[in-house]
Image (tube, grey):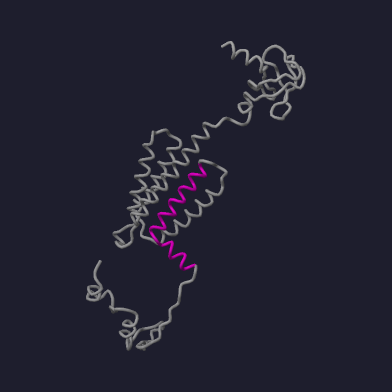
Amino acid sequence: MVSAEKALELGVVEIVADGPGDLLSQLDGRKVTVAGGAQVVLHTKGATMREIPPSARERFLHNLANPDILLILLVLAGMGIMFELKSPGAILPGVVGGICLLLALYSMSALPVSSAGVGLILFGMLLLLAELKVPSHGILTVGGVISFMLGGLLLMDTSVAPAIRTSWQVVIVMGVLLVLFFLFIVGASIRAHRRKVGTGGEGLRQARGRALGPLAPVGEVLVEGERWRARAESGTIAEGEEIEVVGQDGLTLLVRKRSVERATGASS
């Protein structure tokens, strides 16, 4: 990088101006060659300047060309995709994550992005995703967060544009947000594993009902408002007696008298 004066001395630029007015004054009287080879004398001194504001589209695209916005988009994309992979069918997180990923790709095309920074961020996301599948006692989580934060700090290629870099405050906030999101996902996963099965044979186990007719040993029972074919685990069960489901054999429930269970519990 060289100063404006040095660039003028080297012939890289022709004019160094203090502002738009000074630029117009220095351009006045200069001859320029236009298309077709004709020469035109510029008369710019005292010219009226009219500001043309950017359109909404241009403002939106300009805001995307911001390293902090790029980092936020990458985090939102990662969280949305991870949530969708963890809970297939949620749809909305996957859609939001996909949109953020596409916007992040545009942002990366407009900024001097460091491949090392992007690689560290992606590697950190993969480590966090792997934590959901591999019990590492937090090692993958710590490694993923460290990799993400290093990637955020190295996201911009400062050798190309030293003034463009991510804010360390944004890096820290996004790192904390990613950790909180990951803890939420892990907590939801643990709660899902601990939740009692509510469907199928396992969901009906220990469900209570009554015999709609004598079970000697096969008959019909009413369990949770539904009629089921049932078979008594042992002996016979009279009509109207309370029963408890102990298993399932295809579409037939295996049941026993609740009175038998109470007697067994009292004797033990």
Residue 103 placement (x, y as % from top left): 47, 57
Residue beneath the point at 72% across and 13% down: 236
Residue beneath the point at 72% across and 22% down: 210
Q: What secondary structure do most residues of the magenta stretch adopt?
A: helix
Closer to us: 34 or 110: 110
Residue beneath the point at 45% across and 77% down: 52
Q: Quadrant of residue 221?
A: top right
Q: Is residue 163 left or right of residue 242?
A: left
Closer to us: 255 or 47: 255
Q: Is residue 152 left or right of residue 256?
A: left
Q: Which range of residues does the magenta coloring cover?
A: 57-85
Check the image and report above or below for 265 versus 101.
above
Number of marks present in the image shown: 0
Residue 158 placement (x, y as % from top left): 30, 59
Residue 43 placement (x, y as % from top left): 36, 89
Closer to us: 51 or 204: 204
Quadrant containing the C terminus is top right
Quadrant containing the N terminus is bottom left
Q: Is residue 95 left or right of residue 242?
A: left
Q: Quadrant of residue 137?
A: top left
Q: Quadrant of residue 39?
A: bottom left
Q: Specify whether residue 108 is painted magenta.
A: no
Residue beneath the point at 38% across and 87% down: 47
Q: Is residue 2 left or right of residue 75?
A: left
